[in-house]
Amino acid sequence: PINLWPNAVQAYHRWIRTSIAENLPYDRFVREMLTASGSNFRVPQVNFYRAIQGRSPEAIAKVVALTFMGTRTENWQEARRVGMAAFFREVGYKRTAEWKEEIVYFDPSKAEADSAATVPALFPDGARADLSGDEDPREVFADWLIAPENPWFAPSIVNRIWYWTVGRGIVHEADDFGPNNPPQNPELLSWLSSELVDAGYDLKPIYRLILNS
């Protein structure tokens, strides 16, 4: 339901198609979206933030967790939700003189004006993030997210590929990772995740493994 405006939609669509055609590794693809700043017409990746329904840190964190971790934050305890949202409380938006152009950028002043700014940033695994004042928290979160040892990132995307190709996820539904919805075959999910990491987050070998099995 979000109006990205044709120029922005075309730029975003073209970037996604080009990334797939050039086989951009999945970790780089995701990191570029999460850390991008600039014009929605000239830096296509920022449209990820503009397509979210709601611009609060909580709304952004909810979509990031659902999209790249396959998990639903509404099932989390409040401290965990607020802690993750802290990574996105300095995402700023501003208009330009060009019709329908918008800049997405790192805006430290937003944290100063936010009454929740004293809440520490917490990774979803409960670890506290040490953030410096001039550091974009999105970059810290992205580096944590795409790390090989992250328990959500690789499993989430290989599970989605399994779902897209087979018709049912190893974790099903594919966006509902959690203790109340364990994988039907945890060994398979773990093995595919390891294969993805070993392949440098190249998704093509995962498709080959599944489709040739």
Image: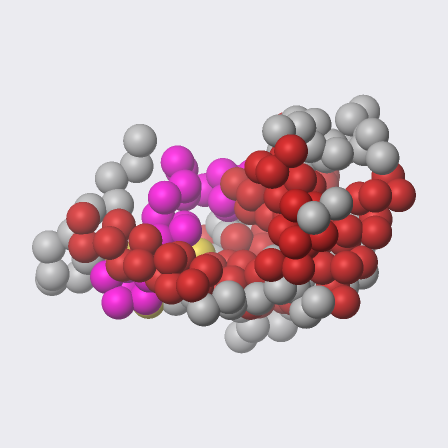
Quarter holding the N terminus is top left
Q: Residue furthest front?
A: 212
Quarter holding the C terminus is top right
Is residue 185 visible in this depiction of the protein? yes
Please count the marks in the image: 0
Nearer-the-camera pick, 130 or 189: 189
Q: Is residue 5 above or below residue 45?
A: above
Color scheme of the displayed model: secondary structure
Taking the spot 30% from the left edge, 37% from the top edge, the residue there is 2
Nearer-the-camera pick, 94 or 45: 45
Q: Is residue 163 above or below residue 153?
A: above
Taking the spot 36% from the left edge, 44% from the top edge, the residue there is 51
Magenta residue span: 39-62
Decide whether residue 54 is among the magenta residues: yes
Taking the spot 57% from the left edge, 66% from the top edge, the residue there is 25
Toward which corner of the image does residue 3 lie, by quadrant? Answer: top left
x and y, in percent, of residue 105 in the image: 38, 64
x and y, in percent, of residue 57 in the image: 51, 45
x and y, in percent, of residue 114 in the image: 49, 50
